[in-house]
């Protein structure tokens, strides 16, 4: 059960409410975000919902039987919009496009990609500086210095920065330089990291784990929300299946299912979802038709020379074509 509290609920009213909740043998957790104040209650007993809803200080009560609660559409029917500032929002109609290299490599690379984004009116740039790599000998990113350079150049052009955070200590370190924290597939169930991201006042894009179920993704999102951060986006980036003709199996079903189960925006990542450049545009378009609120994809001036994920990265020409196609879909 989710109890939405009046923001100005008094201590006496709260005490009365907590007494009523423990009388029906429910355990409660208080959640305060910038947008709201909630009591998330877990229990099994049958009870008359009016006995809680009629108490003073209570705005609304909802029964949510799923393990995830605050991210569920069962209590919030309207969709969540994420405000990135400067008139940029994710969710609520427009398709948000986020593009950039897998890894930030050097200043020249970033400048060229920014010019490509500016030319095509894309205002969110992705780029990793802490790279989770299967091999410890592979390029693992430029770290904080790289992020400072990346972020500085983006800010000169009014472009928002999304980059992956891999561990708790980086949340604070990266804070001044990011607009959206990305949680990668490998960290989708790093609960300490999710807790830490619940405490920041910047949006988070949470990717589905490599073998993560939809339910697990939503429960991971619940960690961040219940920690106090409502500014969340979910990301379908493909899952590992028996199929090995491509890198991952992009789960197109997940887009509709996530949109149905949750009020959070859903972003598609066709680059990691299929892992082969030629197929990326078609999967990106399919995801938009399936209802995605945005697309995040990899682009590089010379993908063949990219330090990571070049095989799934679009060149500028391919990227431009994809942007045009996505925008023309929106006109239909
Ligand atoms: C990435 O976005 O470059 C990345 C590492 O993605 P994922 O976590 O989905 O593998
Ligand atoms: Mn990548």
Image: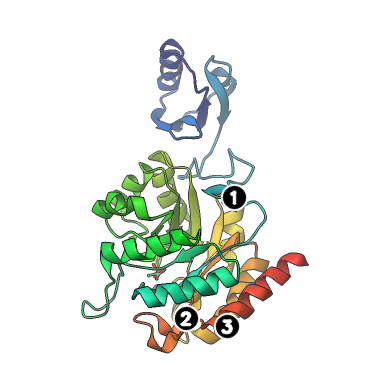
Which numbered dot is residue 208? none
Which residue reaches farthest left? 137
Which residue reaches farthest right? 332
Marks 2 and 3 close (CB-CB < 8 Å): no
Beta carbon at label 2 within 8 Å of ligand 2: yes
Q: CA distance from mark 2 to mark 3?
A: 9 Å
Task: Name the element at disc 3.
Answer: helix
Q: Quadrant of the C terminus?
A: bottom right
Residue in the image at 43% along x and 57% along y: 206
Does label 2 or label 1 sit earlier along the sequence?
Answer: 1
Q: CA distance from mark 2 to mark 1?
A: 28 Å
Residue 207 in view of the camera: no
Front in this rendered view, residue 121 or 143: 121
The quadrant in which residue 126 appears is bottom left
The quadrant in which residue 216 appears is bottom left
Identify residue for label 3: 318
Which numbered dot is residue 313? 2
Beta carbon at label 1 within 8 Å of ligand 1: no
Task: Name the element at disc 1.
Answer: loop
Beta carbon at label 3 within 8 Å of ligand 2: no
Residue 220 in view of the camera: yes
Marks 1 and 3 close (CB-CB < 8 Å): no
Q: CA distance from mark 1 to mark 3?
A: 27 Å
Residue in the image at 42% along x and 27% along y: 26
Residue in the image at 54% along x and 21% along y: 58
Identify residue for label 1: 87
x and y, in percent, of residue 225 in the image = 44, 43
């Amino acid at each position: 059960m989710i109890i939405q509290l009046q923001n100005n609920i008094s201590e006496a009213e709260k005490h009365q409410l907590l007494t009523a909740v423990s009388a029906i043998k429910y355990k409660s957790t208080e959640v305060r975000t910038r947008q709201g104040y909630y009591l998330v209650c877990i229990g099994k007993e049958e009870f008359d919902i009016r006995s809680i809803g009629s108490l003073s200080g209570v705005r609304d009560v909802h029964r949510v039987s799923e393990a995830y609660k605050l991210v569920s559409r069962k209590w919030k029917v309207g969709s969540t919009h994420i405000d990135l500032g400067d008139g940029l929002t994710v969710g609520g109609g427009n398709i948000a496009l986020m593009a950039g290299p897998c890894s930030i490599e050097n200043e020249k690379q970033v400048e060229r990609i920014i010019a490509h984004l500016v030319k095509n009116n894309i205002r969110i740039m992705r780029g990793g500086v802490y790279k989770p790599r299967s091999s410890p000998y592979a390029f693992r990113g430029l770290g904080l210095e790289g992020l400072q350079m990346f972020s500085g150049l983006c800010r000169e052009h009014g472009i928002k920065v999304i980059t992956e955070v891999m561990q708790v200590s980086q949340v604070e370190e990266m804070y001044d330089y990011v607009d959206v924290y990305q949680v990668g597939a490998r960290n989708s169930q790093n609960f300490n990291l999710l807790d830490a991201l619940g405490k920041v006042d910047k949006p988070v894009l949470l990717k589905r784990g490599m073998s993560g179920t939809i339910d697990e993704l939503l429960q991971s999102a619940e960690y961040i929300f219940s920690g106090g951060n409502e500014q969340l986006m979910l990301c379908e980036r493909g899952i590992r299946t028996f199929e090995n003709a491509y890198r991952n199996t992009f789960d197109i079903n997940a887009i509709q299912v996530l949109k149905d189960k949750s009020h959070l925006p859903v972003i598609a990542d066709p680059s990691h979802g299929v892992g082969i450049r030629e197929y990326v545009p078609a999967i990106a378009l399919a995801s938009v038709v399936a209802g995605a609120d945005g697309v995040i994809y990899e682009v590089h001036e010379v993908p063949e020379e990219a330090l990571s994920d070049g095989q799934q990265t679009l060149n500028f020409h391919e990227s431009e074509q994809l942007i045009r196609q996505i925008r023309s879909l929106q006109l239909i």
